[in-house]
Image: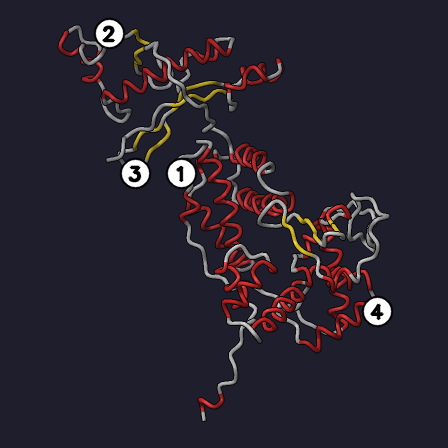
Amino acid sequence: MKLNYSEPKIYTGGVDISQWSSFSSEQKKTVLSKDWFVYFSFRNPETGRLKKEPFIKAGVNKLKTKRERYAFLKTMQQALLQLLQYGFNPYEDNSALEASIFSENPEVSNKVAKKPKQVKIKNEQQTIPENKQVTNQKTEAPSLTIAETIAFGLSLKVNMMNKNSFVQYKSRIGAFEKWLKSKELYNNPITFITKKMVIEYLNSVLQRTSARNRNNARTDIASLFQLLEDNEIIEDNFVKKIAVLKSVPKRNKTYTPKIEKEIYEHMREVDPHLWLFVKFFANNFLRPIEVCRLRIGDIDIQDKKLYVKAKNKPVKIKIIPEILLEELPDLSNFKPTSNLFGRFNIGEEWAADVINKRNEFSKRFKVIKDHFELGVEYGLYSFRHTSITKLYRKFREKMSQHEAKSNLMPITGHSTMVALEKYLRDIDAELPEDYSNFLR
């Protein structure tokens, strides 16, 4: 059976006072200017759900120092917990309970070690026994508004994600904030948000865009709420219980041998720097954004290795095939910190963010793509798919499926065979032989 109450907790102005010694005088003054209190929730008999009860201050904010306030609240917290364990219920008459607790009868008083002092609770109009036992309890901020809570979550996430991922994450959370403002819900506490509200927002995203965008929004909101649950700002991350919709991912199509040859020839003629950029990630089986991160110092020509920051691990080591080494210029005269692929030249300084660098090459490739009148299903990633397909089919001429995949896996960089097999299925790398004889 579930308890009818949550364990009483202490709110200390929204900060972790275990770090008190590191605060400046101004920060300490600001924290002490806020209300401190004890809070708890009790199960509402009508709804059956835990409901936050009025905050218990009992004059604690008249105390001027952290030590005095915290000692006072710890005493009150422990006393309130004992009272709840004895059966205190804010929705019922507690006269009998009060009489038994404060009774002079020795048999009744055995329930309590000694007759407690009484501390008036301003908001509850009840009496709380004072107990000097102190336990280690974490501070929380249940009364934070939606704006304050989201700001807190983003301040933690910025140090937990890479820059590009955080930009997308912040954008999706910002869209959720904008929706809350449009519904005039934004000024409420974070606990005001319900599962139904989040579902309503996700439905609006689905109607406006696609199932994939809706699922991405759900993932990011669930990630934020999980962070809030981990920090005990909310009791339950209900967003992760919202179903994920089935969506068909959009994949770039593989180029036919004829189109691939024509595109490479045209690129080499009109934009040789873009041509080398495409050859570099296609033949090294990298992602375009990974190539944008490369510096001259990441390339070891002598050992034929490159060191790149990958999506799934901090540093990935790849060999540089001879077909690429033949196309690279002499890199010994460039600074190790210079970009391998600058905006227009190898080794050129380029201060743009890596996401903007990738977008620059994508825009330049769109000009090439428009020249051949190719649709949205073709892009830079199509070259990577095409190279992997060509290599796999070449392996299959002399190897079994398992041998071909085993040789391909360290080249493509997939971490598991299952991931590689799924990828090969998605790009239709494995095609059956002609089965006409079986249909005759």
Q: Left or right: 282 with respect to 39?
A: right
Give the camera-side residue of 200 and 171.
171
The answer to which of marks 3 and 4 sits earlier in the sequence is 3
Query: How crowded is the residue under tag 1: few (<14 C-alpha within 10 Å), some, or many (20+)?
Result: some
Please tell me the numbered disc located at residue 269: 4
Camera-nearest label, 3 or 4:
4
Callout 1 amino acid: Asp
Sequence-earlier tag: 2 or 1: 2
User: What amino acid does circle 4 point to?
Assistant: Glu
Q: Quadrant of residue 328?
A: bottom right
Q: Disc 4 vs disc 2: Cβ atoms closer than 8 Å?
A: no
Q: CA distance from mark 3 to mark 1?
A: 17 Å
Q: Secondary structure at mark 2?
A: loop
Residue assigned mark 1: 236
Q: How many neighbours does mark 2 have within 10 angstroms: few (below 14), some (14-19), or many (20 or more)?
A: few
> How far from the left and from the top, in percent, is residue 71?
42, 11
Say few, some or many: other residues with alpha carbon within 10 Å of mark 3 (under 14 / 14 to 19 / 20 or more). Answer: few
The answer to which of 378 and 285 lies nearer the viewer is 285
Q: CA distance from mark 3 to mark 4?
A: 72 Å
- At label 2, which amino acid type do we have? Lys
**Marks 3 and 2, the one that precedes in the sequence:** 3
Q: Nearer the viewer, residue 416 or 200?
A: 416
Image: 25 above or below 382: above
> Is residue 86 depicted above or below 46 in this figure?
above
Q: Are marks 3 and 4 in contact (CB under 8 Å)?
A: no
